[in-house]
Amino acid sequence: MIFGIDPLLENIDGAAILIVLVKVVIAFAALMVSVMAMVWFERKIVARMQNRLGPNVAGPFGILQTLADGIKLFFKEDLIPDNADPFVFRLAPYLSLVPAFLVFMVIPLGGDFNNGKGGVVTWFGSTNETLFQLADPHIGILFVLAMSSIAVYGVMLAGWSSGSKYPLLGSVRATAQMVSYEAALGLSLLAVLLNSGSLSTNAIVAGQQAWNWNAWATGGVPFIVFMIAATAELNRPPFDLVEAEQELVGGFHTEYSSIRFALFFLAEFMNTITMSAVIVTLFLGGPAGPTGWAPEWLQGVLPTVYFFAKLLMFLFIFVWFRGTLPRLRYDQLMDLGWKVLIPLSLAWFLLLAAFKVGQDQNWNRFLVGGVGVVTIVFGAALVSGAASAARARRADQEVAS
Amino acid sequence: MGYLGGFAVTLKKFGEAYFGGESGKVVTRQYRGGRGGSTDEKRPKPERAHGRHVLNRYEDGMEKCIGCELCAGVCPARCIYVRGADNDPENPSSPGERFGFVYEINYLRCIHCDLCAEACPTEAITESKLFEFSFTSREDAIYTKSELLVGEDGQPQKLSWEDWRPGDETNTSGWMRATSPSGDASFEGIIAWSEERGYGLRAPEGGQPLEAAQLEAERQAELDSAGSHSEDHGGHH
């Protein structure tokens, strides 16, 4: 049962269906509005970091700039190149956009998780208890990973079907990058799953109450690795080689114009928001936060406020990355992914697993840690030794030939 | 600093942009391509900037243009169309035989090289510093004599779609005062241009060396003592 476990589904009546519809509308509207706000937010913040003003003409503080851009894009001519595969060319933007929407579905946006209440909220009368998230599948986090893999298809097919060289090169890069960083993403995520013992996002959030957030409960390393890998997965700076303007024009969406381009643009920013939401859910306790001080009427709202505050913090960090870091070279990108992030997250995962086993078996935790660290250092030495030996051999061959 | 030091730099700029401070100072100017009207904040234009043309008049109100078509001939973009006509002896438009009957400049073609102004023997055509052109049809892009010619008072016409700022009307003949006639450096600082309606004899551009002017004056004195008089270059009397 994939879409199970909403308490509503036990007795379906009119109110239950209404609540589901309301949730769908809220999730859709919240995401669309926050994408609009995010585009404005990013342009404004980056401008301020670069001694500029950013959008300031359309609406107060330029907040309607995204809307103006969207309307403009709607009325632009929609071009399909002669060499393009028309069906795939039209399909690709939706393959990018739909997964971005779907990921948001499994994120708990609020609800009281304290004292084992499990984030249940009550809307429209006390008989209908529901979760403040659209769906809570058992496979929660796997669903997120699956959707981000499908988003790769959007990028890949867009580049391939354009029938043009720059989009093709851009999409090849994008595919290689997203596939290789997905490994680091998954491995750092395993540490969280080890801690929470469940794939369901609701259970992961429920396991992080009372400040026992995964960001430090897993030792910090998976959090940082996940953050870096997520940036790469999103193709955001400094990992935006996919659309490196100096080399590839616009990357995979070079040939796209009008509303199809807008869909890619929308998907990119939507992915940024959903990925931030995933980070908040996995590592920072989702809607968790101190609620005891607040009066009764605020209790229901506060978790949602906390969630969006944390979300905003991560959005700012992503923008901060963009304002600060220069783009990586392609070999640096692959080095960082395969030689640093994947081994590091794998080693950390093994260490955490060893601690868990040690806890079950009542082993001395310092002994477990010591042995683990020694083993990891030994492994790291072996890996780097192998790498330098291979490099030396390659250098010899180049000299010989 | 290192790789992570950059984060401090951007955060500092971001913070100071909102809470005041030297490094957060905004460099943007509030210029919206002329759409902002008088709220547009324009940068002061360089002395030799080339913009929309003006056709000048002599002090007595006569048009300087004699319809010789040298400007049209020299124009690399072929954007000028001139047709001369004979002056009515009773009521002449320009001193001399002929005047510019039709004078049109197509601003879709003009590259503002100012070769027309350099070719003009009477300094009839000069350029202002107005640079904001926007048309909705090809016809609108062609400025005719009625738009280019300065008014009876010698002031350039302030067309309704143009954004004139105080002081702009005095900036209509910068190239002459910035360049020496016939490209000879020894003429720098020497007033070698005719007077204009509304402005009289314009002063040379500041900062040019005076030595050349003194040398030229000495040369003129020698020529005068030898008994030959230099021509009055204005030539309209």
Image: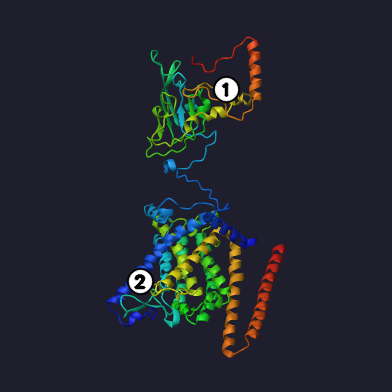
Q: Residue at x 54, y 61 (%)?
A: A320
Tell me which amino acid carries mark 2: Lys
Q: Are marks 1 and 2 on the same chain?
A: no
Q: Residue at the left extreme?
A: A14
> Pointer 1: what residue?
B191
Q: Position of residue A104 (x, y in %)?
A: 42, 70
Mark carried by residue B177: none
Looking at the picture, does residue A11 appear above or below residue A106? Answer: below
User: Residue B127 at x, y = what percent?
Assistant: 49, 30
Q: Which residue has dot 2 on it?
A: A23
Q: Residues within 10 Å of mark 1 (few under 14, many from 20)?
A: some
Write down the chain letter for disc 2: A
Q: Secondary structure at mark 2?
A: helix
Residue sitting at 47 percent across and 63 percent down? A155
- To which chain does the residue with label 1 belong? B
| Residue located at (65% from left, 85% from top) | A367
Q: Quadrant of residue A388?
A: bottom right
A201 or A287, nearer to the observer = A287
SS class, disc 1 = loop
Whole-percent x and y of residue A194? 53, 81
Q: For this rendering, which residue is in front, A211 or B80?
A: A211
Q: Amino acid at mark 1?
A: Ile
A1 relative to A52, above or below: below
In the foreground, A326 or A298: A298
Residue A134 image-quadrant placement? bottom left
Q: CA distance from mark 1 to mark 2?
A: 81 Å
Q: Quadrant of the C terminus of chain A?
A: bottom right
